[in-house]
């Protein structure tokens, strides 16, 4: 099939281009900077927020399936407010532009990245896709993020009869290039002993190895199923389990325990929420509907693994 990947320089998008080509698809890589493009059958240079350029670039590629892996979360380390604001814009305006471009190009299927950790933290420790999204979270920043996620899913799942939509709700990504890699933001924080464990550590995280995010996107491209699916590993874990394990694997000091009431002030609202209250996300529907299953079923086997930094800097990615 002819597949266009938007976000083809990204943590998921870049390896996805290669994985789709290995399956025999003809892949167009949509990038902003041609010099950073992966090997692809065609390169489309366009900014997803520039409607006209996007429409003409996508039309020329004539994709049958469009994959949306756009985000600006790479900016998180330098400028978190800008990273969230730009990502929200990509989820709303960027998604609307991409859908218009996909439809104008004659595509019949759209596969978009969403997140599996946006649910209201109520009920069972592990939730399915019917759980309501936390659009009224007490933190205005997280509420705005979840509203943009909800808007993206509405756009993707309500595309009408001519274009089928799939929202892949990825769990917390780990592996090369992610925040949880040794050189990522969270990895560095744990190595520096700056991610303490709020007492009880009752928040549940569903992790996902980047290779499985790629695998699920390939499965979604090739499937005919539509809807929103949790794409997560098989072992949702409380913070009290995964954080000490992660620190040990990294060779970091064990996380110190802090009173849960201090967590929002010391860690920021989102991290405090993730470690104390968040729910996990069950992957049964993705398994059944997409015929996908994780090749890394447990975070235990990979979270915190990766090359160590030698004293002279060798081995750093
Ligand atoms: N589920 C999760 O845990 C989750 C979800 C998302 C992100 N993250 C974290 O966020 C970090 C980044 O991951 P990611 O895959 O979302 O982001 P990423 O690796 O930065 O990929 C985002 C892609 O979007 C492209 N893009 C951004 N703005 C664009 C625009 N206006 N027009 C066209 N393309 C645009 C980027 O291209 P350029 O190269 O041109 O910028 C890049 O190809 C990782 O550390 C990851 O762990 C985690």
Image (cartoon, rainbow, N blue to C red):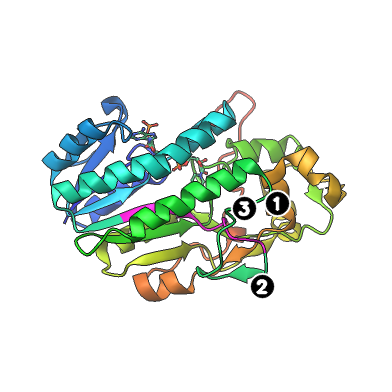
- The x, y position of residue 278, in whole percent, is 67, 58
Between residue 263 and residue 242, name the one nearer to us.
263
Secondary structure at numbered mark 3: loop
Q: Residue at x 60, y 23 (%)?
A: 312
Q: In the image, is residue 14 part of the stretch drawn in magenta?
A: no
Left or right of 114? Residue 59 is left
Residue on which the image places disc 1: 273
| Crowd class of label 1 (few under 14; some 14 to 19; many from 20; radius 10 Å) | many
Q: Total of numbered circles in the picture?
A: 3
Residue found at the very far right of the displayed protein: 259
Q: In the image, is the residue at mark 1 within 8 Å of ligand 1 by its beta carbon?
A: no
Task: Assess whether mark 1 and mark 3 are in contact (beta carbons under 8 angstroms).
Answer: no
Q: Measure how far apart labels 2 and 1 are at the Cα level.
A: 16 Å
Residue on which the image places disc 3: 136
Secondary structure at numbered mark 2: loop
First in sequence: mark 3 or mark 2?
A: 2
Select label 3 or label 1 by which is in front.
3
Q: Is residue 174 visible?
A: no
Select label 3 or label 2 by which is in front.
3
Residue numbers of the magenta segment: 111-121
Residue on which the image places disc 2: 124
Task: Assess whether mark 1 and mark 2 are in contact (beta carbons under 8 angstroms).
Answer: no
First in sequence: mark 3 or mark 1?
A: 3
């Amino acid at each position: 099939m002819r597949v266009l990947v938007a976000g083809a320089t990204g943590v998921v998008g870049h390896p996805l281009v290669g994985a789709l080509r290995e399956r025999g698809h003809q892949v167009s890589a949509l990038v902003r900077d041609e010099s950073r493009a992966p090997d692809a059958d065609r390169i489309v240079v366009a900014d997803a927020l520039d409607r006209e350029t996007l429409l003409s670039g996508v039309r020329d590629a004539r994709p049958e399936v469009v994959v949306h892996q756009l985000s600006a979360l790479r900016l998180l380390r330098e400028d978190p407010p800008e990273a969230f604001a730009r990502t929200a814009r990509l989820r709303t305006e960027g998604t609307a532009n991409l859908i218009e471009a996909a439809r104008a190009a004659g595509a019949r299927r759209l596969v978009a990245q969403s997140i599996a950790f946006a649910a209201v933290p109520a009920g069972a420790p592990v939730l399915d896709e019917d759980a309501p999204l936390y659009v009224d979270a007490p933190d205005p920043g997280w509420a705005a993020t979840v509203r943009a996620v909800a808007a993206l899913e509405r756009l993707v799942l309500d595309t009408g009869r001519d274009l089928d939509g799939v929202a892949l709700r990825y769990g917390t990504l780990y592996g090369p290039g992610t925040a949880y890699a040794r050189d990522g933001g969270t990895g560095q924080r744990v190595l520096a002993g700056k991610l303490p464990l709020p007492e009880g550590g009752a928040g549940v995280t569903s992790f996902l190895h980047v290779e499985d995010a790629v695998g699920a996107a390939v499965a979604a491209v090739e499937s005919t199923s539509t809807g929103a699916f949790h794409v997560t590993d098989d072992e949702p874990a409380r913070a009290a389990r995964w954080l000490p394990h992660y620190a040990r694997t990294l060779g970091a000091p064990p996380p110190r325990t802090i009173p849960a009431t201090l967590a929002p002030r010391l860690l920021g609202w989102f991290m405090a929420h993730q470690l104390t209250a968040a729910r996990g996300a069950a992957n049964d529907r993705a398994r059944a509907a997409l015929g996908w299953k994780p090749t890394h079923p447990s975070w235990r086997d990979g979270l915190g693994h990766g090359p160590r930094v030698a004293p002279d800097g060798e081995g750093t990615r």
